[in-house]
Amino acid sequence: MKKSCKTLQKQLKKVALELGGKSPLVVLEDADMEKAAKTAVSNMFMNTGQVCTAATRIIVPKTKKDEFEDAVQKVLPSFSMGNPREDGHNAGPLVSEGQWDTVQSYIQKGIDEGATVLVGGTGKPEGLDKGYFAKPTVFTNVSNDMVIAQEEIFGPVISIITYDDIEHALEIANDTIYGLAGYVVGNDPEQLRYVASNIRAGQITVNNARTDFMAPFGGFKQSGIGREWGDFGIEEYLEVKAVLGMPS
């Protein structure tokens, strides 16, 4: 019995897990659509979309859909994909052939599901035949139950999803197994605060605020358990001991 208890004790581990994400970017009605589009596109290009916190679901007011799509197409040419050893490029190739195949399969799934390719699509960008480059791809006319809106692609692919009102936007934002990060852009402080407070994710960024490594970072739901960074990150390595009934 003692031997088995010792064996069990050796096997027990305290863990903190930082897992995947399918993070929403909620664009408020009063947001500057060109700035919001730049935020969305920069998320797509950052590390070629191979970022667990990337905002891959862009949740836009239905009344602003056309304006936002126009803004995306206007902003996109200012971002460049190419050889990362050369200056002037915002993104390089994917990490491996396997990941390139995965990204291509998701783009094809989006097409098969009936989403509209606003820019990009399957295959490699023009002039980038060597290396695992994937076309930066923006889908529109996406519903949140589509595979491309629910599963983590880990590549330069984002989806535009429209909403009717703020509660509808939050319903879409939280309709995922993940909860790692979330984003909101707009001008009304009360709406910004309300949306940020009600997205079920571990870290919410408002209006492109700078990362603070003293703030706790970690996921809700299937995005992980535990926290990194700051005091909360240190506490993950500690065990609390309580002593009760000591005489004064």
Image (spheres, grey):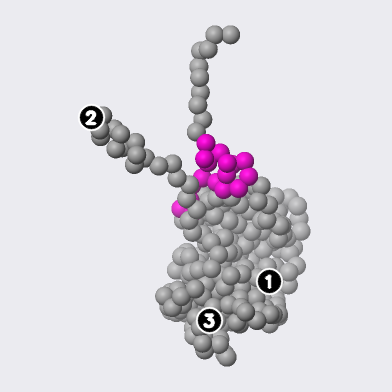
Q: Secondary structure at mark 1?
A: helix
Q: Amino acid at mark 3?
A: Phe
Image quarter (top left, top right, bottom left or bottom right) of the N terminus: top left
Q: Quadrant of residue 80?
A: bottom right
From mark 1 to mark 3, how far is it between C-alphas? 22 Å
- Counting from the top left corner in percent of width and height, residue 173 is at 56, 58
In the rendered image, residue 74 lying in the magenta stretch gets the answer: no
Residue drawn at x 61%, y 69% is 46
From mark 1 to mark 2, how far is it between C-alphas? 63 Å
Circle 2 residue:
1
The front one of 241 and 7 is: 7
8 is higher (above) or lower (below) than 186: above
- Counting from the top left corner in percent of width and height, residue 63 is at 67, 69
189 is higher (above) or lower (below) than 105: above
Circle 3 residue:
133
Q: Which comes before the other along the chain, label 1 or label 3?
A: 1
Is residue 221 something that shows in the picture? no
Report whether 230 appears left or right of 151: right
Q: Which mark is residue 37?
A: 1
Pointer 3 local density, CA inside 10 Å: few below 14, some 14–19, many at least 20: many
Total number of numbered discs in the rendering: 3
Q: Which residues are magenta?
A: 221-238
Residue drawn at x 52%, y 40% is 237
The reply to whether callout 1 and callout 2 are in contact (CB within 8 Å) is no
Please identify, in this view, whether the residue under mark 3 or under mark 2 is nearer the observer. Answer: 2
In the rendered image, residue 224 lying in the magenta stretch gets the answer: yes
The front one of 16 and 11 is: 11
Q: Amino acid at mark 1?
A: Ala
